[in-house]
Amino acid sequence: MADLLAYFESAGKPAAQWRVGTEHELVGVIASGAHVGEAPPYEGPHGIGALFEAFAKNSGTPVREDGFMIALARGDTQLTIEPGGQFELAARPVADDKDFVSDLQAYVAELAAASKPLGLAWLSVGMRPFGTRLSIPWMPKQRYAVMRDYMPTVGSRGLDMMVRTATVQANLDFADEADAAHKMRALYSVTSILTALWACSPIVDENVSDFQSYRAWIWRDTDNARAGLVQFAFERDDIFTAYTEWALDVPMYFIYRGGYVRVPAGFTFRQFMERGLGTEHATRADWALHLSTLFPEGRLKKFIEVRGCDCGSLGMIAALAPMMRGLLYDTTARTAAIALTAKLSFEERQALADEVPGKGFGAKAGDTTVGELAKELVAIAKDGLSRVAPSALSLLDPVEEIATSGRTQSDAILDVWSSTNGDRSAVIRALAHPGLDPA
């Protein structure tokens, strides 16, 4: 147990060294021709493999499995793929959020240069709007093959999560266990509000759905043993121990021994530690791998991951880091964020997490609405950011506009869908990221 706790304890940093990292996934489409709107496969003239090779010509160390490039490492930055070909940038952590904006602009320019010869565009959405799950090619990554078989045994929407959804995440540092516990409590207190603010996935199977964030709804029945809310975040200050105890009893997917080795159904890390698996015994690397396969709204590793938001516009991608910096790196803001929903029981929080994907700002939280709480949360974030990083305040403008107007990115997508009658080419032109459009 001490070794497992040390994984978290060794990650603490003084406040002067805190940074924030942003990861985001983009949904790609074939931009024109007979296959317009379709998801790009890995191989072929519109392929994700060719996209990787174009990036690799500029710089980076390719990561390959079975001959396929599945990632490209560039120092603290990494390009990877999700199961349905969503292209992910895990950007370097930064002390100044404007540095991430510069990194994002450079990435978009490079992605555009690589994508246009391949006929690809990239959409400002949290879920692929075109086709069905069955129409999406799977990427050749070994761990995804294991997860593809496992997901239908533990929930009804896991495969949709894997191949159709796209998120933006922020990763934040902590000083020690007490600091991590306070930050996790604040994050879990407001995660449903963040989901409503970043909602950007209302189209499902090329039809208007009843959801603001269908991506968030998918997560509500993906694998509830390893996803969603965790009650101990609201109750325990020994967060390293609490998270470790929880993680020990979540079933494992696999271990890695030169390749991914499947484990028996229901086999937990606690069992792996106690009795091993054949001739194999648990290592620290196994623990780190297992932690990476847990998907709660706030994930604890050597940093805290904010996981509740749809991907969307470049402005909203850039806004998440300063939003969370303001909320979590300032003690006054953290305390205020916790107080926003402090009267809710855990059962009421679960009900809210079920309701927000559909109703968004209209969801009820006690005697108020998520829309009203969103306005307060943005004000709290701005107040905190004014103390810890005032130069980044303007990056919160898109979030403040959504909270003030009550109109989300999903509402804008629905307007596009209505005005174009869902025509694929027209939707792509309207929803493609600037610079990543078909032109």
Image: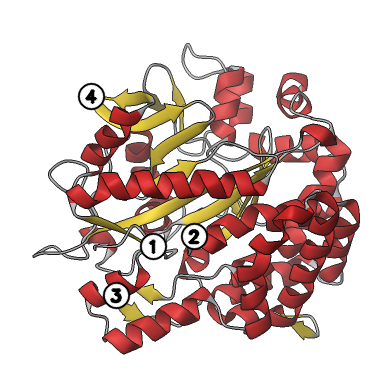
Please rate how many residues cluster around mark 2, counting C-alpha atoms within 10 Å: few if below 14, some from 14 to 19, many from 20: some
Residue on which disc 2 sits? 314
- Which amino acid type corresponds to the residue marked 3 in the rendered image? Val
Residue on which disc 1 sits? 434
Element type where label 2 sits in the image:
helix
Query: 300 or 336, which is in the foreground?
Result: 336
Residue on which disc 4 sits? 67
The quarter of the image holding the N terminus is top right
- Which amino acid type corresponds to the residue marked 2 in the rendered image? Leu
In the rendered image, the vertical position of residue 301 relative to residue 354, given as above or below: above
* First-in-chain label (4 vs 2): 4
* First-in-chain label (4 vs 3): 4
What scheme was used to colour the molecule? Answer: secondary structure
Residue ID at (10%, 64%): 33
* First-in-chain label (4 vs 1): 4
Q: Dividing the picture into quarters, in which one does residue 208 lie?
A: bottom left
Element type where label 1 sits in the image:
loop
